[in-house]
């Protein structure tokens, strides 16, 4: 009787992590809404979101300048920040579950480097395209090239790491590092051959930016990212089982090989789309999932949707800071995420020194 009492008392003292994660998800939804509203309301221009909404409620037409700033510049940029932040955070969470390593990142398997090589190739070599092709592709050239770069990277990586129908995670990890190094070398050669205007474009793009967000780019990236985000919760049970090891996961009925393939393809699609429209943005994929594990536990059923929400909130906050810190100029968002994320990453390393043998 005494034992039952102690067990009941202990159970009451231990918080239900799923309940904590659900409450955290509700708070994160509110944070995303607040940050999205702030993103629409703040910027170098003096356009007021509240006056614009008042005009719409009262049936008055917006001034052309205010309408262009709010609906053509700020709104697609806000949507893009949500999509890119969610894509990078979920990609990081999936990779960390797949590799069973909390320091895994989308750049780890070379997908980011491959997408960057494709985009840089489009910037440097795009002028050499025949006019007929250039007119048809137009503003979609860089996103398409980045998608192609990420797709080729993941196909090569999958071919290297798969033998007799089985994919080796360790080979995939090492192959991703090698492919990333080769892609970085190719990008360096193209940058060396670029002219002054191309160098300015490349420099801004490599640092990460949402300044070029348009409805056309949202239309290109949104379907890919949304499909990847929608599919990610279906990997949760498998990733939870994989934490025990591949053999125990297989004994639990998890199709491990199919799980690896789907996880890698999902990360390739989400990361490739994000890099295509925003350039290089670091630390979101590594910091967000780790913080959520500390707050609400490692269950991927709640970790993945919460990662999407926290990643979106973080990138919205970083974009707002980038717009207002040195207004009317703009700070590249990659610099902001590095400044915010690097100290957190160092803290993670310090906390895990013994486990990682650093």
Image (spheres, rainbow, N blue to C red):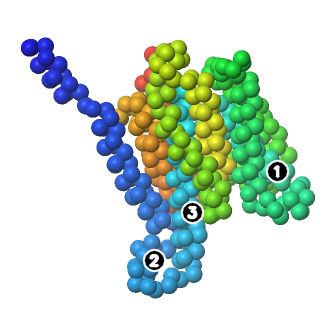
Q: Which mark is residue 76?
A: 3
Q: Which mark is residue 124?
A: 1
Give the Cα distance between marks 3 and 1: 26 Å
Q: Is residue 34 visible?
A: yes
Q: Secondary structure at mark 3?
A: helix
Q: Position of residue 183 (x, y in %)?
A: 76, 35
Q: Position of residue 285 (x, y in %)?
A: 54, 38
Q: Earlier in the sequence, mark 2 or mark 1?
A: 2
Q: Left of 320 or right of it: where is 178?
A: right
The residue that label 2 is drawn on is 52
Asked if the residues shown at circle 2 and circle 1 are in contact, with their CB atoms under 8 angstroms apart, the answer is no
What's the residue at 78%, 61% (across, down)?
Answer: 138
Q: Secondary structure at mark 1?
A: helix
Which of pointers 3 and 1 indicates the residue nearer the eye?
3
Give the Cα distance between marks 3 and 2: 17 Å
What's the residue at 31%, 43% (across, down)?
Answer: 23
115 or 166: which is nearer to us? Answer: 166
Label count reads 3
Q: Position of residue 265 (x, y in %)?
A: 64, 36
């Amino acid at each position: 009787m005494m034992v039952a009492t102690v067990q009941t008392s202990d159970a009451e003292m231990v918080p239900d992590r799923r309940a904590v994660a659900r409450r955290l998800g509700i708070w994160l939804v509110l944070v995303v809404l607040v940050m999205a509203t702030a993103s629409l309301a703040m910027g170098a221009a003096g356009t007021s979101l509240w006056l614009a909404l008042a005009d719409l409620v009262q049936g008055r037409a917006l001034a052309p300048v205010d309408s262009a700033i709010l609906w053509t510049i700020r709104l697609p940029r806000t949507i893009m920040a949500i999509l890119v932040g969610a894509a990078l955070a979920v990609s990081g969470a999936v990779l960390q579950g797949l590799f069973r390593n909390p320091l895994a990142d989308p750049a780890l398997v070379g997908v980011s480097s491959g997408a960057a090589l494709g985009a840089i190739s489009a910037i440097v070599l795009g002028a050499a395209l025949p006019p007929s092709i250039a007119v048809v592709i137009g503003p979609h050239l860089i996103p398409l090239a980045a998608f192609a770069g990420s797709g080729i990277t993941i196909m090569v990586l999958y071919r290297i790491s798969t033998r007799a129908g089985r994919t080796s995670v360790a080979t995939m990890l090492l192959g991703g590092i090698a492919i990333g190094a080769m892609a970085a070398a190719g990008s360096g050669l193209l940058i060396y051959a670029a002219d002054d205007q191309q160098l300015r474009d490349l420099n801004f793009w490599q640092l990460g930016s949402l300044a070029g967000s348009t409805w056309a780019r949202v239309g290109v990236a949104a379907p890919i990212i949304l499909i990847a985000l929608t599919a990610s919760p279906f990997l949760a049970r498998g990733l939870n089982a994989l934490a025990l090891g591949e053999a125990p996961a297989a004994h639990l009925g998890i199709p491990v090989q199919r799980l690896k393939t789907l996880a890698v393809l999902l990360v390739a699609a989400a990361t490739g789309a994000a890099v295509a429209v925003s350039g290089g943005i670091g630390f979101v994929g590594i910091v967000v999932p780790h913080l959520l594990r500390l707050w609400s536990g490692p269950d991927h059923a709640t970790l993945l949707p919460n990662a999407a929400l926290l990643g979106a909130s973080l990138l919205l906050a970083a974009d707002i800071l980038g717009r207002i810190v040195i207004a009317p100029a703009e700070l590249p968002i990659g610099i902001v995420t590095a400044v915010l994320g690097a100290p957190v990453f160092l803290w993670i390393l310090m906390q895990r020194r013994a486990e990682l043998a650093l």
